[in-house]
Each structure stands twice: as C-alpha cells, then as structure tokens.
Amino acid sequence: MSGDLRERVLTRTKEATPEVIAIRRDLHAYPEVGFTELRTASKVARRLTDLGFQVRAGREVVKEEARLGVPTEAELAAHYDRARADGADPEFLELVRGGFTGVVGEITGARPGPTIAMRFDIDALPILEKASPDHVPVQEGFVSRYPGVMHSCGHDGHVAIGLGVAEVLAAMKDDLAGRIRLIFQPAEEGCRGAFAMMEAGVVEGVDYFFSIHLGLGAPSGSLYPVVDGYLASTKLDVTYGGQSAHAGVMPEAGRSALICAAQAALGLHAIPRHSAGPSRVNVGLLHAGSGRNIIADRAFMMVETRGSTADIDQFVLDRAMAILEGTALAHGCTVDIKVVGKTISGTSDPELADVLAQQAALVPGLNVSPTPMVTTGSEDATYFMRRVQEQGGMSVYMGLGSDLPSGHHTPAFDVQERDFADGIAAIVLTMLEVGNHPPKRSA
Amino acid sequence: MSGDLRERVLTRTKEATPEVIAIRRDLHAYPEVGFTELRTASKVARRLTDLGFQVRAGREVVKEEARLGVPTEAELAAHYDRARADGADPEFLELVRGGFTGVVGEITGARPGPTIAMRFDIDALPILEKASPDHVPVQEGFVSRYPGVMHSCGHDGHVAIGLGVAEVLAAMKDDLAGRIRLIFQPAEEGCRGAFAMMEAGVVEGVDYFFSIHLGLGAPSGSLYPVVDGYLASTKLDVTYGGQSAHAGVMPEAGRSALICAAQAALGLHAIPRHSAGPSRVNVGLLHAGSGRNIIADRAFMMVETRGSTADIDQFVLDRAMAILEGTALAHGCTVDIKVVGKTISGTSDPELADVLAQQAALVPGLNVSPTPMVTTGSEDATYFMRRVQEQGGMSVYMGLGSDLPSGHHTPAFDVQERDFADGIAAIVLTMLEVGNHPPKRSA
Amino acid sequence: MSGDLRERVLTRTKEATPEVIAIRRDLHAYPEVGFTELRTASKVARRLTDLGFQVRAGREVVKEEARLGVPTEAELAAHYDRARADGADPEFLELVRGGFTGVVGEITGARPGPTIAMRFDIDALPILEKASPDHVPVQEGFVSRYPGVMHSCGHDGHVAIGLGVAEVLAAMKDDLAGRIRLIFQPAEEGCRGAFAMMEAGVVEGVDYFFSIHLGLGAPSGSLYPVVDGYLASTKLDVTYGGQSAHAGVMPEAGRSALICAAQAALGLHAIPRHSAGPSRVNVGLLHAGSGRNIIADRAFMMVETRGSTADIDQFVLDRAMAILEGTALAHGCTVDIKVVGKTISGTSDPELADVLAQQAALVPGLNVSPTPMVTTGSEDATYFMRRVQEQGGMSVYMGLGSDLPSGHHTPAFDVQERDFADGIAAIVLTMLEVGNHPPKRSA
Amino acid sequence: MSGDLRERVLTRTKEATPEVIAIRRDLHAYPEVGFTELRTASKVARRLTDLGFQVRAGREVVKEEARLGVPTEAELAAHYDRARADGADPEFLELVRGGFTGVVGEITGARPGPTIAMRFDIDALPILEKASPDHVPVQEGFVSRYPGVMHSCGHDGHVAIGLGVAEVLAAMKDDLAGRIRLIFQPAEEGCRGAFAMMEAGVVEGVDYFFSIHLGLGAPSGSLYPVVDGYLASTKLDVTYGGQSAHAGVMPEAGRSALICAAQAALGLHAIPRHSAGPSRVNVGLLHAGSGRNIIADRAFMMVETRGSTADIDQFVLDRAMAILEGTALAHGCTVDIKVVGKTISGTSDPELADVLAQQAALVPGLNVSPTPMVTTGSEDATYFMRRVQEQGGMSVYMGLGSDLPSGHHTPAFDVQERDFADGIAAIVLTMLEVGNHPPKRSA
C-alpha cells in the first residue's frame, strides 16, 4: 500500500471522528435491547443511505422464523412508540418494526475485486447505568435516558465505528476494489440475531469476513488481530408449572414449582466437566412463586450452556434437557423449555489475520499483538464466520483494546472514544488491502 | 334474653344491612394492603365517630417499634396520595398516615358491666382480581380499581360487619351493659399488625374478647362458635448477597446467590416434622439473578415457618436460621434475615363459646355447629386472645360460613353478602348477653 | 372372676418366671434378624409342642409371596448353618428354613367360648450391642454372641412373655373357655412379617385379638391398655444404576448414581406435610459409589414413608415414587424400587381395652393407665388388628412399661426382667375373662 | 550409540523377559493396596539385592509424617499376616512393615556420569477382578487370589518392567556411566506415596528423572515420550456427625448427616469451572446412615478436587472446604475433613524427551509418537519431577502403549505382556545414552 493512501485514510478518519463520537453518544443515550433496536437501526439505515450505500433492512435481511428470543408483540409495540417519539427515521422505522432490526449496506469499489463483509452488533443490555458524577456519560450528558437499559458492552461504539468506516470508505470509493458489505446486526446479546441474518443470506457471496469487539480486557492503543476461544452456546428459557395451595392450610394440595426449579438448578450446575475442552452451564435468573404463604405454582429460569466446540455444548445441553424434564416429572410439574439463543464456536483464518496485523501496524500508536486474545465468552458472529469459511472464504474476529473503568455488563462500563479512530483506520486500511486479494469462494 | 330484645336486634340489623353492603362494596373497590389502609381506616374512624363511639386511631393504638413488615417510606407516601385522591377522610387520614392504620372505637352501655372487645381485620392482598363477567364484583361494578390489589380474603366483609355491629349497638345503647370496644386492625395478612396494637394496650382491661372470620370452607347459613388449630408462625425475608461475574468468561470469580438460595430452599423444606404437633415450612417466593450469562449476585426469598404451638414454630425457626446462615457460609455469600411477621397459636374458651352458640341459635336460619372448625392457617388475633386470657378474661374465635365461588387468596374469591346480617345479629345478641356476665379479669 | 382363680394365676406365673427369664436371656444371646429367626422359631415351636399346644410352623403360617424384604438365598443359607450350630431344634428347623420363621400354637379350653389370639414378635435388629460392664447383659453374661445383631427392641422379652403365657395357660387348661391362639411372628422390624401370616390365615376365626409391646417410654410397673397412633408405613429399597468413569480423565462419560441419589434424598425430604394428620419420610441409609476417583455407578437407599392413615401414607408414597423415578430420568440413571415392608394404622376397641384394664388392675403393684399411650412409630400387628375387626371381632394393642437404660433401637437398650411376670399375669387373667365373652364374629 | 550396544541391550532384554512376565503374574495374583504392599516391596528389595543393587527400604525412604491416607494399625497388622503367609521375603518384610513399603535400589556404572532415577509404582486397587474365562488372568491362572483387590491399573507391569530394567542394567554394568537409581513407590493410587518418598530425599542429587505408565489408551507397539496434562489434585475424607433418632417417633430430635452430606455433594459438584484451565471435583463415595427408620447420625464421603495447575486445584479445594463446613453448620452436624492425598501437575522437559524418543526409535517395531499424550488424570510422580527440576535437573513422564481389553480401574483391565520388553529396551537404551550427558544439577 502506498504511503499516500495510508495518509489519506488517516486524514479521512480524523475528519470523520467528531461525527463518530456524536453518533456513539446519541446511541448511548437511547439504548435499545435485542430486536427492539428500532431507532438505532432506522438511523443506521438512513446514514448509510445518505453516504451512498445500497441499503437493505428489515425482513429482507432477517429471516423471521430463524430469530430466537424475540420479545412479545406487546413489548415490540410499546418500543415502537418509544422509538418514534425519540426521533427514529420514519421511513426505515416501518421497515424494521416487529423485530426485524437488521441493516445491510453495500458499496462497490472502482475496480473489480472480492466481496468483503464486516459485522457490527447494535443492541444494548437490561442493566441500570451508574448515575454518579464520576461516570463519564453522566459528566458529558449522554447517560442512558432509559433507566434499566444500557450500552454496557460497547455496541454503541461498534455502530459508531461501523458508520465511521462507512464514511471513510464512501469518501475513498475510487481507491476501492471489490465490494464492501457492512452488516449491522440486532440481538447479539443472548446470541439471537446472527443466525437469522445468516439464514436470510447476508453473507452469501462473501470472500473475506471481519468482526470486531471493543475492550475485552485489552488496553487502549492495542489491537488483537485474532480473538479466539469463543464458546458454542445455547440459551434456554425454562418455565415450570406447579400447583398453588395455601402452605399452611393444605400443603399437600400444592406442587411447588420453586422446589422443582431449585432441584433443577442444582442438577444443572452438577453437570460434569468435559475432558475434551472447556464447558459452562449457568442458571442466571430464577423467579419463582407469588407469595410467602402460597405454594409456588410457577418458576421461570434463564439458563445457558457453553462448550469450546458445538459437540461439547451439545453434551451439556443434552444433560441439561434430561435434568430439566426429569425434575419436572419428579415434582409433578409441567415444564416448557424454549431455545432462545444459540451460537457456535469460531476460528479466525491466520492468513487473513496477518493482513489485518500488517495494516493495523501502519496506524501510528497502535500496538498490534503477535498472539491471539483468548476469551471464553460466546458470540454469534461465529455463524457468519463459519458460513463464509464453508463457502471457501476467510474470516477474522479482531479485538480493539480500550481502557475500561469497569468490566463488560456492569453498570459503570464505559469505553474510551479516542480508540475509535484507530479501529476505523485499521479496518479501512485492511479492506483496501484485501480488495487487491483474489476472491476466495470455492464456487 | 327476652324475645323482645331479640326481635329488636334482628330488626335493627335488617335496617342496617343496605349500608353494610354499600360499605363492603366501597372497600372492595378500593383495596389497600397491610399498613397502607389509609382510606379504609380513616373512613372507619369517621363512621365510628359519627355513630357516637369514642375513637382512637393511629400511633395511639399502634405501637411503632412493634410493627413488622412495614412498607418503605416511598410506598407509604405514594399510597397516601392515592388514598387522598380516593376520598379518604381528611381528618383521620393525617392520624393514621405513615403505617399506623389501626382504629379503636368504644361505646359505654347504660348499665355497668364487663368490657367486651372484638377484632376486625381490614387489609387486602397483592392479588390480581378476576376480570371475567361471571365474577360478581365485576357484574355489580365494585371490582378492585387497583389491578394487583384485591380483597380476596373477605376482610372487606369483616369491616362491614364490624361497622354494622357498631350501628346496631349505637341504636341499642340503652340495652347495653358494660363497654364494647371494636378494634379495626391493619396488616393481618403476614401476621404483622395485631402485635403492635396489643403492645399499644388496646386489649388492656378486656374481660371478653371475640374475633371472626368469614368463609373458611363453611357454607352460608352456618356459624362455628370455635375456630381452632391456628398455627403459630414466623415470617422471614431473606436476602443472599453473592458476587456477580460473567458466567462464560470468568465463572470462578462469581459467588452464585442463586445456587445458595436453591440449596437453602431445599434445606428448609427438609426440616423434619415434629412429633408433638403439626408444623410447616414454605419458601413461597424466590427471586434470584439479573441475567442469563451473569452469575447471580443477589437472591431474595420469602419464607414462613409454622407450628401448632409457639414451641414447635420456634423449633422450625431455629432449624431454618441455621440452614439459612450455614448455607451462606457454604457458598461464600452474605445473608440478611428479617423477621417480618410473627404470630402464636390460640385457644377459644369453651364457656364463652357456649354463650355465643346459644345466642347465635336465636338467629333464624343460622345453623350453629356443635363442633369446632379446625384450620391450619395462621392468624394474629391470637395475640389478643392470649393477652385477654392472661388477664383472667376469656376469648373466642368464631367462623361465619359463606358459600365461596373460589378459595381464599385466589383471584375469583368472593363472599355472599347475605351472610353479613346473620353475623351482625349473632354478635350483637352475644354482646348484649355477655354484658350481663361478671367481669373476668383477675385484677 | 373369683379371687381363687386370680390367686392361682399369680402363683402359676410366679412359678413360671425363672424359665421365662432363662428363655429371654438365651434369645438375647442368640439374636436373629427378620426371616432368619430359625433358632428362635424352632425353639418356640418345640416349647409350645412340649406344653401341649397344637403347633403349626413354616409355610403353613407364612404365605410365601406375601413376605416383604426377605434376605437373599445366600444369607438364609448362611444363617441356617449358624442356627444349626447354635442348637436349633432339628425338627422344626427344617420346617421354618428358607424365610418361613412363623409359629402358631393353639390350645383349647375345657369349655366352649370364643377364639382369642395374641401376637408376639420375635426378631432382632442389626445393631452392635454395647460391650461395657455397666450393661446388664454383659454383667450377667447373656450379651449378644453375634456382634452387629442385637435384641434392642425387646422382642426377646415378648417371646419370653408369650411362652410364659403358654406355660400358665397349659397348667390352667381346665379353667379355660374357648380357644387361645398364640402367634409368634417374624420380621416385625421393617413391617415385613405380619402381612404374610395374615395372608396365610392365622387370624381367621379370631374373635378377640391382642398384641403387646414392652417399654415405649412407660415406667416399670405400669400397663397401658391402649397404644394408639401407630402410623401406616411403607418401606422401600431403592437402587440407582449409573455409569462409572474415571472422574479425572473422562468425567463426561459417567452418570453419577451418587448425585442422583443425593437429589432424590433431598426431594423426598421436601415432600410436603399433610393437613389431615401426621406424616413422615426418611432416607435412613444411603450407600453410593466405589472409589474416590470413580463416578459412582450405583447407589442404594433405604427409604420409608408414614402417615397417620393409610391414605396419608399413600400420599407420601405417591410423591416419593414420582421423585425417585423422575430423578432417575433427570440423571440418566436406571432405578429399581422394591417395596420391602408395609403396614397400616391400627385402632384398639375400647370395650376390649376395658376388660384388659380391669383384669390388669388385679395384678398387685401394676398401675393401669386411664389414658392411651400415643406413639408415632409403626407396627405391622395392625394388619391382624384390622383383619379381626373386619371379621366382626375386637382388637387391642397394649403397652407394658419397663424402665429402660437407653431408648429402643440403641446399643444400650435393655428391659427389666422383673416386669415380665406382671405382663404374663395380666394377659392370662384377661384371656380367662374374655373366654366368658360371646364370640364376636359377624358370621 | 554403537549398533553393538543396542544389539546387546535387545538380547539381554529378550533373555530377561520370561522372568519379567513371571514376576508380573506373581504380583497380579497377590495384589496389595497402597501402603500394604509388604509382599511386593519385600520381593522387590530381595530381587534388587540379588542383582547387586544397593538397596534401601522402609522408613529410610518413606518419611513417616509425610504419608497421606495410611490404613489403620489393624488393617496393616492383618495384612502383615497375609503377606507373611503368602511368601514375603522375611528380611525385608520387617523393614517395610507398618506402612513403609517403599524401596530404592542404586547401581553405579563403570564410568562417572550423572545420576539417573526412575520411578515405578507398585500398588493395586480395591476392585473385584473379572472372573469369567475370557479374562486372560483367569485363563492363565494368575487371577487375583484376593477378591476385591486387583492390579487394574497395570502397576504389576510397572514393577515387572522395573525389575527387568534392573536385570539388564546389572548385566551391562560395564557399559554404564553414572549412577542409576530405581524407585519403587507405594500408594500411587490416591496420590499418597510419592510425597513421603520425596520428603525422605529419594530424588536428592538426581540429574535426570523418568517415570512410566502402561496403557492410557495408546495401542501396543507405541511409546509416547511425553505424557502431559496430569492434574494437580487433593483427596479428602469427610465425615459428618449428626444425631440419630427414631424417624417415626421423634424426627425432630435427629440431625440427619445423610441430608447434610447430600446437600454437600450437590454443593461440591456445583463448584464453578475455572477459566484458566481444566478443573474437577468428584464425590466418589458416600456412605450414610445405619437403618431405614433411624435418622442417620453419620455420613462418610470420599472427595477429590483437581486442577490443571496447583492454583486451580487450590481454588476448587477452597470452595470445597467452605461448602463442607458451611453445610455442617446449616444442618447442625459436626464435620471432620482429612487430607488423605495430594499431588501437583507436572511438565516433561522436551530436551530429555527427545533423547528418549531417539533411543526408543532404535527398538524394532516400536512406534514413537511425535506428539505428547494428553491425559487429565492425576499422578504423584509429579512431586519427583518438580523436585528434580527445582534442583536443575530434567524430568520426563513417558507412556508405553498396550492394547487393553477394558479401561483402567475396571474389573476386566489387563495389559499385553508382550509390550514389556519394548519398554525395558527403550528405557535401558535411554539410560545408557543419558549416562553420557553432563550432570544437570545447579549445585
């Protein structure tokens, strides 16, 4: 890559940065949880359109029956009103309503070349943001306007970086070879959205695929070309139905769904380790019963299983299903088990990671790690990664460091906005470079 | 008792009945849970005053530090606004605000005689009332105006009967010997209110004490002079504090309050039976955790223990405390245990029950049961019963049958208003008769 | 009853006492657990025969397929050798071998009259007897010769009393009206033997039935004509089969029967109380696993349920079965559940108890309790009691007090031999008196 | 190494093989569990002495207070009688009695050189050997003579190989440089013996250390120069003391150690995974209670924790201790926790493994694996490995493949005797080669 091109990328990135930060702060103030990202998605679609991207949104890029863990109609409707009141783009709002909050923008370069795609996730979390004055979003006035909903995993930053990449690419279209497809995905939390976008075909024809995450424990000024170790995972919503009765007057008439769930929770956590690799199981939430002197007739649990491979996750899941069902029989309760999220593990291609590493090294002040970052979380971008690899393409999951005042999914989480520009520059440089590579698809 | 007196009681009762039913329906429409009965208590105090009773209300009859399970200041304040808007009596509203919703009215007869008291409980329950057209309160337009709060134990009927008794007594003051004290008690549900009124002295000097409950499985047209078997009980709110952590990324950093609570719940339910009499234990509610992939850092449980004697309840309670605390240590969690309700068992005096039986038999169409009704619920009127007996007096807990479409504490609960008059007449006749008995106090 | 007859009974009893005590000590030294009472039964049969009773033993009085919890063939065979070596009666030994250790002796009086039966249980317990010098059986040299087997419930005394009754009756045959049937029953512990003898017809045709127990917390010199409160009970042997695996190398290949049993034990103990009366559940023994680093592939539990009525016991049993089976499914284990014991509750007939009370009062120094003793144990003589009552007859379960140095089923248990004579006299007097009563059978 | 030397090693090994197999079969027929290997150790010491080794045995090589999980005095005494009757060497029997069954033999080469040591473990397991005719030890007449004790992990083969190595080395003393120390260690099962021999100083001064295991899933004819992944582990014996009571008559008087242990077992198995590496926890054995109708007053558990590092094992252990102790408090039980085994993880030195790989490749027909075998078991030879490395030396843990009809620690386990010669030859060749290497100790 010519030094000139590099300079122009850095300059364009610098120019784009104020808007990128403004976008991030706007999204941070108006967080939206999975499949309700109506305001977010509509604004992304509007911005991409304005930048000259060819935009698809809603049902065209999110396959209805492949979605997992979609909120109820009532919740979606209530959020629609909120989004409209909060200034969602009216045109795209209609397109993405009803739980179809995915957006795909594509731009075609001046020269032929491969198809390059990148995924940015857009959803927030049901967490109450820290309200004290030492929290930067409070100081700067962009703290969440919706108590109990918060961008505490940095996806606001992901969207901002994605739109920053779009802005720089749009300005450098003449330098571009091939096609760039930017995928803005709903409901990454709970691993619910990627599968439905993959099933809608959004990575069909992709030769090179990228995904990114901010933070992850790495410091500001660092980039990891590979994030490894994402666990395959399945998310379950479990409801036990028992029989209520007055606990003093006629305890024998009851069937305690609470006791049933307590036994199931212990059984789940006693699922054995697997010798072939890491596994996990967690009952993260349990709500049972309605009053002190009533035998609980309902219990609800949020459960997840994980494994370093899909097989190990399946092992834990199979054990979990038996425990959930057998325990229901043991306690005379009904059980309803819903798969509300699912993902697989993912592996980055070293060859593509090397390209990223070389280009990222061109960004002044950005330290490129020679070794992968190893996590044991889960991430549904792995569906895109594997699908592209199955087509003969290559995939990479990168990590962009950022000094965090508090860990992911905590009330005081925050990212350093100064890191966004480094990420944008590294991504654009890499995309320009990869544009010169041959298409990889087997077809 | 002369036949004439009986006829006058029956006539006065008949005259009072429309107002009694109107009161019941008004209370049913505006239900208020324990210690927030601001509208209810203020209206009771107003009515008693208007009928010529000497009325005490608020802090004078509810000892502050003896109350259990009082709602938070914020809840009390919010309810105050609601009560004022709903037409609470302004004068008494100020007296009973802040969780002091007890009222005592006293009337003095024309002749000297013993002091007779009766307890009526006034609180509603946090239950969502049935909304379908086959539910009488819906048909007749007095269904609860506050979804999620409901008179589903018949205390609205208790208050109406109590004010009906007051009205008839006021009209027959010249026939009355001794003094009659009517006690309107908050927060019977959860066994939280009687102790605080007893500690304020409301049954000091009482020779004969009565309490009543509607329904309890007995049919309309029946009266049980004795309800027996009320269990001593203790109510606990338990909070476990753990340590949250990402369940996939760093499970070892977490301390699951959910698993801790699940083990505690199983331990509590495994507390052994007691050979000396019935016992109970129930974890009625368990809320733990905040999200699927987070190790739960908090768990809240509502627990109750019971025993046919205070000793047996104490046995269960002692075991429960050890389990709750030991389990916290086992799982590295903190534990906070609050006693939010407590009551004892109670025994009716057969001699006084016989007087009631004889007088109730004078009410046309009312069948008087020769045997006690045996329940295994809990009831804090037992504190009044025992205190009066300790003073040398006698106590009775009676049951007034009523055909119920659905059991106590269920959404379709309702009582038959036609039964109120029978209860009022039986009570007034008994009070007039007991007025001729000598004072019983040892002093 | 004539004073002369009373004197003769007391005299005959006194004469019989040394032999009674010798028998008791011999049995105490050679204890035999349920269905292995080969030496005991053969000696009882020999003694009854020698006293002139018509004796039936073995398969004739123990219905094979109605037995519960019979030891294995190997255990029975091993015990046969032991019994033979220890001086069992060779003739009757052959009759009772193979788990048919019941004996029935009958004697016919000089005059016609009703059929009167009495049950004596004969089995010991798998308990290690106390070996210290302050234990009377040690001092007097009749401590158990078989470590780990012990008469720690007083059945040795029951047999001795039964044979004392036989001796006195045989000597007073001319005073006797009707027929007396003495039933010596195996395997009362675990409630395994009575049902099989009842099914073999041993109480058919009985008008008046008695049973007795020593001790039960009552002091020496007292007799309770009625022991009440025996709980219906079911005894279960439960075996879980899992899958073993090396716990370090391949934990995922295992199915822990130990964890399965732990969950089942907790589930069983969490079965709710019943409002209609006392209930019980106990997992008394749990043996699981074979080694520290092996996932346990087998777990064995000894379980019992109880209820104050057969319906309540059935309620607990139904819940227990669901828990045992559902938990197996939950953990991928097989489960085998065997009913190894079962009994019902029993009620004494007051009229017959009154006869006993009057006659017992004739024994000098014996205090007769005016009120029943209430226990909450279980006892399978209740099968005989109910069967006789169903036939139109009457039944009584009596308690003979004895100062115990230590409770039933403990290593230091012992009875006072001086109490035996009181019991023998009271029983013989009652049988002589009841002989004058009319037959009660409906037929 | 000269081809001639190699040929002589192979020839000597071939000559030694019949005796090696005879030794193995003799040991297999007389298996002895940890610290009772009296016959085994005495025969090993005798054989080494006869071969010209300088032998130390007993307290000199096993530090008394550093032993873990030593059988009781009674068990040791009983086994002494057995060993003597079975032909133990009388001289060495006295030396190793009382739980000091370690033996060390040393031979000095003709030339100076480093000190080379190798560990062979000698103990059997408490497993009932398969008795059917398709089991080779049955066919060939060397099945265990002690039902319930069995060499089902191949340590009989280890001893035989060790003595085969001794025989060949003794015959080739003139070719030898440096010193060879052969360590025969008791009680490897449960990780109880190595630490006590290390503490007695048996690897002091060692430059190069080897250990070996047969089988491990690798086929006959293969050798793995490195076995990796041994987990650090701690072994606990846990005893809960409760309070017995009759479960029907007075359940409230009991404190069930069985329920306590069931809760603890579930709590232990719910200890979370660790993100830094594999961990394990297992309750392998639980014995609780004495009878069906008695509240269990005692429960015994065999527990083990593991971790891929000592820190991770410590994490699991810390959690386990809290659970064990907190659960005791919760259920009013006493708890006694004994550490009866402990080991660490171990890492082979690649440089030394390369020497082994090269020499093993000289054995005809032996395939040398280029990659390590990864296990997740535990092994206390790791104490020797680490100690030697701390001194500046190098250590290797090798695996010798053998076709197994059934897995380790199962009743049908067996090894192929034809594999022994390959192992002996590879080891002797390696020792001769390493003799030419310089001493490694830092001192």
Image (cartoon, coloured by chain):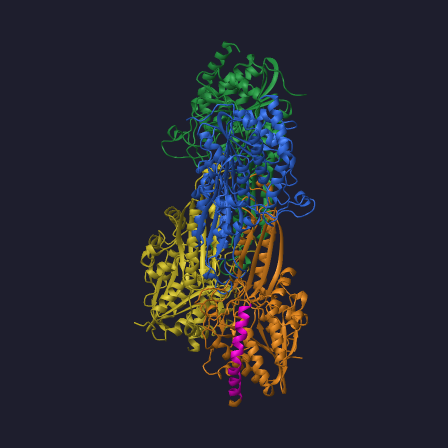
Chain colours: A orange, B blue, C green, D yellow
Q: Where is residue A12 in the image (x, y as percent from the top left)?
A: 53, 84
Judged from this view, the residue extending furthest toward the left is D443
Indicate the quadrant containing the N terminus of chain B: top left, top right, bottom left or bottom right: top right
Instruction: Please name whichever residue, B392 or B52, is drawn nearer the observer in this view of the structure.
Output: B52
In the rendered structure, the answer to whether residue C268 lies left or right of residue B67 reads right
Q: Where is residue C279 in the image (x, y as percent from the top left)?
A: 55, 37
Report if residue A102 lies within the magenta region.
Answer: no
Residue D395 in which image quadrant: bottom left
Q: Give the range drawn in magenta.
A: A5-30
Q: Position of residue A225 (x, y in %)?
A: 51, 77
Q: How many marks can you see?
A: 0
- What residue do we see at 58% from left, 57% from top? A319
Indicate the quadrant containing the C terminus of chain B: top left, top right, bottom left or bottom right: top left
User: Above or below — where is C53 with respect to C135?
Assistant: above
Residue A95 in which image quadrant: bottom right
Instruction: Please name whichever residue, B79 or D201, is drawn nearer the observer in this view of the structure.
Output: B79
The secondary structure that dominates the magenta segment is: helix
Camera sees residue C232? no
